[in-house]
Image (cartoon, coloured by chain):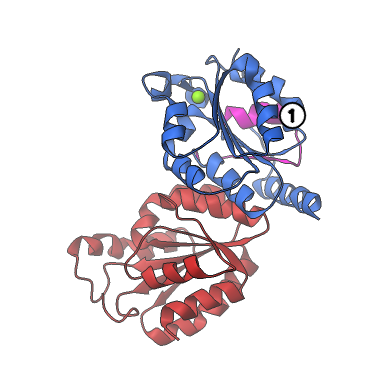
Chain colours: A red, B blue
């Protein structure tokens, strides 16, 4: 099974039946898998804060949500994460492409990468960094932890995890 | 009429439905008209009333009404494309278009200038878009509910505000009782 298929299967096995995404090359296989999965409604969003709003509604409507985005999105979602997801105490798994880490070819991505963990730490968001393919074994447990705690949780997946950009 | 009068006229309809209400004065006005567990008040996060409501409509069968403002829709304009391209006939976006940012002191919005949110919504792929005047607001909303079609309503009214206290109900309480009421309606 591909690593993308494993992540999609873990989402489905945890009853994550609503996923919103913005496009990403590294997470393209996961996004394709979500689009094709019969049990997952895929609604692409235009911006990540909009996506977090959709996820808040999905969860209040009784469906477990997730968002797929890049780490640059941390820069545009701070207010939404704080005043919606955290303030109203809602779960939100954020499967994130961690651009700007080892094996990154685009220098500008590094500028946001160096702030990513610090920002997540400042927001008190539990954060997991997938660097080796075997790190994905914890994805199922992380999803369970997220819905148990009713908190946003970040899963950072870097280029090395994806076998190089 | 100003938004607070419009909401008062809408209230007999809104009280029977699940409503996501925009940040600031719209939520405070709705709250003062009569606090209800089927009302989800936004205490922050300007711009996301439509997104939260649409996420609700996509994931359960009850009719969901998002009360939004022209300024808030402008801050999340992509939402109209998402609404236009995904199917949820239990969804109504009711935009109170007073041409101003009411909660911050009635500074003018571009919707009060050359921008038509009605035309933007249509261009974004929303099929049922109705522009109406404040006096037609309740009848237009009721017709949209009865049509069982995803509808965007742009209701024109005057800018102006009344003084109201902030909502001090705990956000987790607002959210929890809203979910419980929705769950009960769906069971
Ligand atoms: Mg306004």
Q: Position of residue B119 (x, y in %)?
A: 43, 28
Q: Residue at x 20, y 60 (%)?
A: A108
> Residue B168 appears in which quarter of the rendering?
top right
Q: Does the magenta stretch include residue B41?
A: yes
Image quarter of the C terminus of chain B: bottom right
Position above or below: A142 against A42: below
Q: Is residue A151 magenta?
A: no
Name the residue carrying label 1: B13
Q: Can residue A137 be seen in this view?
A: yes
Q: Where is residue A92 in the image (x, y as percent from the top left)?
A: 55, 61
Q: Is residue A14 left or right of residue A53?
A: right
Read off the magenta span. B24-46
Q: Is residue A161 left or right of residue B85?
A: left
Q: Which residue is drawn at 36% across and 67% down?
A: A97
Q: In this view, does B57 lie to the left or right of A135?
A: right
Q: Residue at x 36, y 53 (%)?
A: A75
Image quarter of the N terminus of chain B: top right
């Amino acid at each position: 099974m591909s690593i993308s298929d494993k992540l999609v299967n873990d989402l489905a096995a945890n009853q994550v039946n609503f996923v919103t995404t913005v496009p990403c090359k590294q997470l393209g296989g996961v996004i394709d898998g979500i689009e094709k999965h019969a049990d997952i409604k895929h609604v692409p969003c235009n911006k990540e804060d909009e996506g977090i709003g959709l996820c808040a509604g999905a969860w209040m409507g009784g469906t477990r949500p997730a968002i797929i985005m890049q780490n640059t999105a941390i820069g545009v979602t701070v207010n939404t994460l704080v005043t919606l997801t955290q303030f109203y105490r809602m779960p939100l798994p954020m499967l994130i492409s961690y651009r700007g880490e080892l094996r990154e070819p685009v220098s500008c991505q590094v500028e946001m990468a160096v702030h990513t963990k610090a920002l997540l730490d400042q927001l008190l968001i539990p954060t997991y960094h997938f660097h080796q393919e075997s790190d994905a074994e914890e994805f199922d447990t992380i999803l369970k932890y997220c819905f148990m705690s009713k908190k946003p949780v970040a899963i950072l997946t870097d280029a090395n995890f994806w076998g190089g950009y | 009429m100003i938004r607070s009068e419009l909401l008062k006229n809408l209230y007999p309809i809104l009280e029977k439905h699940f409503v996501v209400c925009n940040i600031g004065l719209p939520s405070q006005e709705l709250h003062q008209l009569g606090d209800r567990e089927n009302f989800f008040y936004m205490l922050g996060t300007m711009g996301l009333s439509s997104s939260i409501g649409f996420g609700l409509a996509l994931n359960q069968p009850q009719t969901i009404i998002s009360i939004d403002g022209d300024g808030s829709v402008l801050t999340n304009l992509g939402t109209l494309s998402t609404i236009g391209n995904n199917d949820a006939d239990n969804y109504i976006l009711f935009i109170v278009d007073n041409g101003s940012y009411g909660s911050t002191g009635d500074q003018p919005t571009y919707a009060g200038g050359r921008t038509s949110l009605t035309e933007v919504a249509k261009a974004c792929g929303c099929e049922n878009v109705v522009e109406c005047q404040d006096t037609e607001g309740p009848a237009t909303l009721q017709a949209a509910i009865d049509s069982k079609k995803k509808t965007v309503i742009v209701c024109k009214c005057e800018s102006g505000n009344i003084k109201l206290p902030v909502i001090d109900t705990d956000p987790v309480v607002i959210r929890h009782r809203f979910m419980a009421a929705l769950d009960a309606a769906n069971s």
